[in-house]
Image (spheres, rainbow, N blue to C red):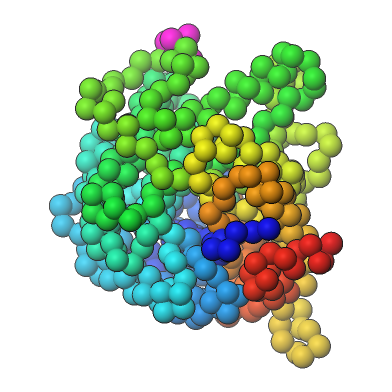
Amino acid sequence: MFPEKFLWGGAVAANQCEGAYQEDGKGLSIQDVTPHGIKTPRTKMPTENNMKLEGIDFYHRYKEDVKLFAEMGFKVFRTSIAWSRIFPKGDETEPNEAGLQFYEDLFAECKKYGIEPLVTLSHYETPLYLAEKYDGWINPKLIEFYKRYVRTVFERYKDQVKYWLTFNEINSILHEPFMSGGINTPKSELSESQLYQAIHHELVASAWAVKIGHEINPQFQIGCMVLSMPVYPLTPNPDDVIAAMQADHKNSFFTDVHVRGTYPGYMKRYFREHKIQINVTEEEIEILKHTVDFISFSYYMSVCATADPEKNKRGEGNLLGGVPNPTLEASEWGWQIDPQGLRNVLNQLWDKYQKPLFIVENGLGAVDRLVENESEEKTVEDDYRIEYLRNHLLQLEEAIEDGVEVMGYTTWGCIDLVSASTAELKKRYGFIYVDRNDDGTGTLERYKKKSFYWYQKVIETNGTSLREEK
Ligand code: BGP
């Protein structure tokens, strides 16, 4: 059974839905120069084929959208603040009032319907200037700029927002240094020491956010956010089991630091053996002890690991990737579907840390077709999405029965938006269809998909409808 106060809802990120990329004083962010997501190098300036520049026009249509979320019964809505709306270049000392006002209005609109905002402070949208002038998070100055930014928004929204996330999928910087860490130096030229220096700076900044946030409002619940992906050994060979453990360490390092406040032994060993040297000050060691209130994560898929170089071939997948699992099927974009992996992740994190958990992303990216139903309303018959979500929610419920404490669940892309990895609109996740295409055509009208009514019922019955459907 789902707990009584379970936070059901959906999630988006500013850069993937707002559009209005130059409105009301907003500065450019790294997303404005990456028209093809992570697939091709960035452009010098924003180009017309970049779907994120206009997004789904959430900036102007958020009232209509929040109303639809309320109609589904959302208790929580996760979005991010675009840092470059508040500090257009990132290193200014004074914030942009118009940007602050936009989010104040958005959060007020959520509150009007009793929807709790859950706010990501940095979701793959570092101000471009910070990437170009400072090389992003490699530079310790970013910590100061981030502190100023988070202090500004914490103070402004201290009575509107209770739940905060410090960095979206913080561990994805390992694979996507530009998108995740605003690091301008090409990946191929980046040393491991530079990469881990940037990671260290983000971890310190995250701990600062916890400290500053709790000083401003002790009621704040501030969490870390990681990309979770269980790593299974490809075979029962003990070498593969160790390979899976080591692959997992690369990611669990981030939660270890966030929850325990120190670097784990396996990471110190990794640094030693790979000759990684990073600067760490005494003050930073102290700051890291400001640990998070809860752990949030995205969950889409699992992967395998092997010690056999012949079989160690990376498959398709989200930002981390890994060896494909021969027993699982995949989405149209090659992401392997593994609902039980969610139960696994929840149990592992709970057993390890005993901290409340929040699933803040989960969902199926698929091609949807708009059709007219009997009442001549346009809709999408997305039974595949319903099946995906139902199977994951049933596993989530299993984990709750296992004794795991889960605060809530927000599906990814509750309204169609632009994909992070491929910058496409045709990869849709929403309960709400947005009439917008990758060639820039479309009316931007919103239509309720079949899954809209399905999720509405799930929320209304606090999950009991899931079992009836089986
Ligand atoms: C996560 C990101 C999101 C989101 C999601 C789906 O990695 O946090 O921003 O987009 O994945 O990925 P995609 O949009 O590439 O399908």
Picture residue at 64% right of the left edge, 79% below the top: 447
Height in image: 248 above or below 149? Answer: above
* Residue 85 magenta: no
Picture residue at 72% right of the left edge, 71% below the top: 454
* Residue 272 magenta: yes
The reply to whether residue 33 is visible in this rendering is: no
Our reading of the magenta stretch's main secondary structure is helix
Residue 175, how many percent across, how many down?
52, 34
Picture residue at 71% right of the left edge, 29% below the top: 232
| Left or right position of 7 against 214 | right
Height in image: 218 above or below 354? Answer: below
Residue 459, how many percent across, how many down?
63, 69
The answer to which image quadrant residue 464 occupies is: bottom right
Where are the magenta residues, as a range? Answer: 270-275
The reply to whether residue 249 is visible in this rendering is: yes
Residue 273, how many percent across, how many down?
48, 9
Q: Give the residue furthest to the bottom.
A: 375
Height in image: 63 above or below 345? Answer: below
Task: Please state, as top left, top right, bottom left or bottom right, where the N terminus lies in the image.
Answer: bottom right
